[in-house]
Amino acid sequence: RIFRIFCCHDRPDSTSGEYPVSRWVELDVTPRRILLASTPVGPLGSGIGGGVELTLHNLVYGLGLQGHHVEVVAPAGSLHVGERVHQVKGALQVSSQTQARDAPIEMPSGSVLAAMWSTVSDIQDQFDAVINLAYDWLPLYLTPFMRVPVLHLVSMGSLNDVMDSALADVELELSGRLAAHSMAQANTFPDPAMFRIVGNGIVTERYDLQTRPDAEAALGFVGRISPEKGLEDVAELSARTGRVVRVWGMMQDEAYWHRVAIDHPDARLDYRGFLPTDELQAEIGRCAALVMTPKWVEAFGNVAIEAMATGVPVLTYDRGGPAEIVVDGVTGFVVPADDVDALADAVERIDQIDRAMCRQRVDAEYSSLAMADRVVTW
Ligand code: UDP
């Protein structure tokens, strides 16, 4: 299905009064068969894969709505999404954010990553393209050896030297195969220009706009309980402002959680566990604002658009993806990184933000269809 689109200038010619034709564009909307390769750190639905799990769901949905055929390869035990999930058994990979920059690449015996990519290789001819969502060396290395195009949607900033050079090698051999979620993420790599920026998206229909917070007007924090998320600053903010902070997320580092609590005895942190999306969105929507205090360059920060979709403004440090998502003074406030005073000041100004505007912004920029458009163009 090829559409020819007629493009003209947006203003009429001053003498003739006609709109001059600038060009014809061909838009190819042929349905594609797309195979998505998930992260090998955990099954879909476990939460171990963090934002990658949500990205994958969103892509399956958005690409499906556009008429593409989408299948998924993921570790055994994954939730069902798309037309088919190829469930692959094996030992899970350790998350890369816990590893040192000079760490060599490690794979456990009986690696699920290796098994997943054997599956991808076996079934590749049934697809037009493979989109890899895993931040791992093996799929990058295999890219030039595959018969179908493999594209990589990179989910993290630069963390490891071996990964940086594997990414650079793909770009060198097969330019255009790499995409990132934000400029800030791309800028952490030696050559940011090798990435196409595709942002991210969510299935907006699953999120309800809540026009006001509940009576407690608590702040919210959503993320894996892990040091790179900077929960200690949120605790500090709670102690200073006296506000309750409701916390949702996978308890990845329990010792860290206890340390934060001990170091901030006056903080009013209310841990509410890890919730499935439908319940999480209802809960976030009751908050006065979502707080993001990343200590690393957050590649995107799905939770920012999830909160905004429920009408909740986002207060974030000026670091990484969230600072690109939030329009300062319109959908939240962007404050200097690591400045808890500035955050406390932003808490005082939350009421200046129009919650309906937060939702509108997500509908316009971060819906599954908007994301699918960007990915299909890529
Ligand atoms: N999340 C969830 N339930 C929870 C807390 C978090 O499903 O109780 C999901 C959240 O929706 C988001 C992901 O966990 O999609 C975290 O992604 P993000 O991009 O914010 O950070 P990452 O974990 O990838 O660093």
Image (cartoon, helix red, strand yellow):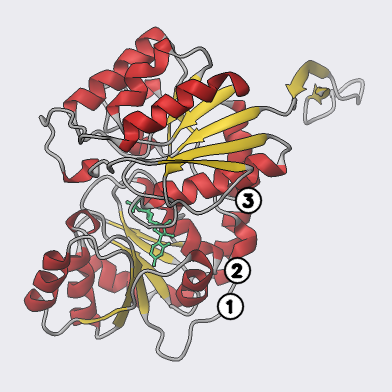
Between residues 315 and 117, which one lies in front from this camera angle?
117
Mark 2 or mark 3: name the one nearer the start of the chain.
2
Mark 1 or mark 2: name the one nearer the start of the chain.
1
Q: In the visual, does 42 lie left or right of 22?
A: left
Residue under label 2: 356
The quadrant holding residue 106 is: top left
Q: In the visual, does 13 lie left or right of 120?
A: right
x 26%, y 73%: residue: 344
Q: Quadrant of the C terminus?
A: top right
Kindly identify which numbered label has been placed on residue 252: none
What kind of element bears circle 3?
Answer: helix
Q: Position of residue 247 (x, y in %)?
A: 32, 73
The kind of residue on which mark 3 rests is Ala
Q: In the visual, does 112 lie left or right of 174?
A: left
Query: From mark 1 to mark 3, how far is it between C-alphas?
Result: 18 Å
In this view of the protein, can residue 329 be seen by the observer?
yes
Q: Within 10 Å of the Cα at label 1, are there few (<14), some (14-19), or many (20+) other Cα atoms?
A: some
Q: Residue furthest top?
A: 173
x 69%, y 34%: residue: 68
Q: Position of residue 164 (x, y in %)?
A: 25, 24
The kind of residue on which mark 1 rests is Thr
Residue under label 1: 211
Residue under label 3: 364
The quadrant holding residue 125 is: top right
